């Protein structure tokens, strides 16, 4: 699907793998490529768009009542091993797919080097390098520390750390914004939130390309 591990509907050009490999630019789709066929599943919002955009050799499959899902198609296709890039799928999604295919006698294989990226090669757009900036408190509404306390309260001692990968959640928590994705003021990053024993000891670890940090966002 055109969702990355950041679980974002809107993507930076470097993450638009479905668009590159198939021509389809809609926000909802799943591609299946075998040695003999290339198929794209999408919903009714995009049937006409997919028909116009899909490159030669691609077949559109419809997501609708009683239509064959990609799960079912793969289980009936004669394929025995299914490669998937684990960095592009959440844990729950990976487990659900693995369980289904295992029950059908298929094996899921983790492909750590994305095969679409290999085809894309040197023409693939670079990861955005726009600077992050701090959002003024009058727009953010609350201080970072106040938001830390809210998150820690929701965790309520049930976990020692919280991994945050959704970009809008990271930006909200840290009161930062960016220009990494068109029309979306987000910064590409990961974050681990660490609740403390009291409201003054909460902290977070931001994983980001340090060149993206401006002086006020360090």
Image: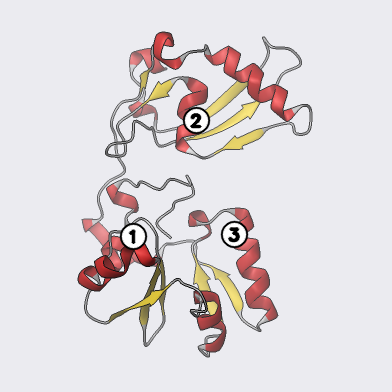
Q: Disc 1, disc 3: CB below 8 Å?
A: no
Establish if 65 lies above or below 116: below
Marks 2/3 in contact by CB < 8 Å: the verdict is: no
Q: Looking at the image, which residue sits at the far front?
A: 65
Mark 3: give few (<14), some (14-19) or many (20+) Cα within 10 Å: few
User: Residue 163 placed where, x, y %?
Assistant: 61, 37
| CA gap, disc 1 and disc 3 | 19 Å
Q: Judging from the image, what secondary structure is the residue with disc 3 in? A: helix
Kindly identify which residue carries mark 2. Answer: 170
Q: Nearer the viewer, residue 24 or 20?
A: 24
First in sequence: mark 2 vs mark 3: 3
Residue 17, numbered label = 1
For discs 1 and 3, the disc positioned in front in the rendered view? 3
Question: In the rendering, at what x and y percent does residue 164 appear?
Answer: 56, 36
- Residue 10 vs 194, above or below: the answer is below
Residue ID for mark 3: 93
Label 2 – label 3 distance at C-alpha: 22 Å
Image point 60% across, 61% down: which residue? Answer: 94
> In the rendered image, which quarter contains the N terminus?
bottom left
Q: Is residue 110 left or right of residue 155?
A: left
């Amino acid at each position: 699907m055109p969702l990355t591990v950041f679980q974002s509907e809107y993507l930076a050009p470097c993450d638009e793998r479905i668009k590159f490999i198939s021509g389809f630019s809609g926000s909802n789709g799943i591609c299946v490529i075998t040695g003999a066929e290339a198929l794209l599943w999408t919903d009714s919002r995009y049937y006409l768009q997919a028909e116009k955009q899909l490159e030669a050799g691609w077949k559109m499959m419809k997501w609708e009542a009683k239509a064959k899902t990609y799960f079912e198609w793969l289980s009936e296709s004669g394929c025995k091993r299914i490669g998937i890039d684990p960095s592009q799928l959440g844990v729950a999604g990976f487990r659900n797919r693995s369980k289904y295919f295992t029950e059908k006698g298929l094996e899921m294989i983790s492909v750590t080097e994305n095969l679409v990226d290999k085809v894309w090669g040197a023409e693939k757009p670079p990861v955005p390098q726009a600077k992050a900036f701090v959002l003024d408190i009058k727009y953010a509404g609350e201080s970072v520390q106040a938001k830390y306390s809210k998150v820690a309260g929701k965790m309520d001692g049930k976990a020692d750390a919280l991994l945050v990968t959704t970009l809008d959640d990271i930006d909200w928590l840290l009161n930062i914004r960016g220009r990494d994705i068109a029309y979306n003021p987000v910064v590409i990053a990961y974050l681990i939130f660490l609740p403390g024993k009291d409201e003054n000891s909460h902290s977070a670890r931001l994983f980001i390309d340090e060149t993206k940090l401006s002086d006020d966002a360090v």
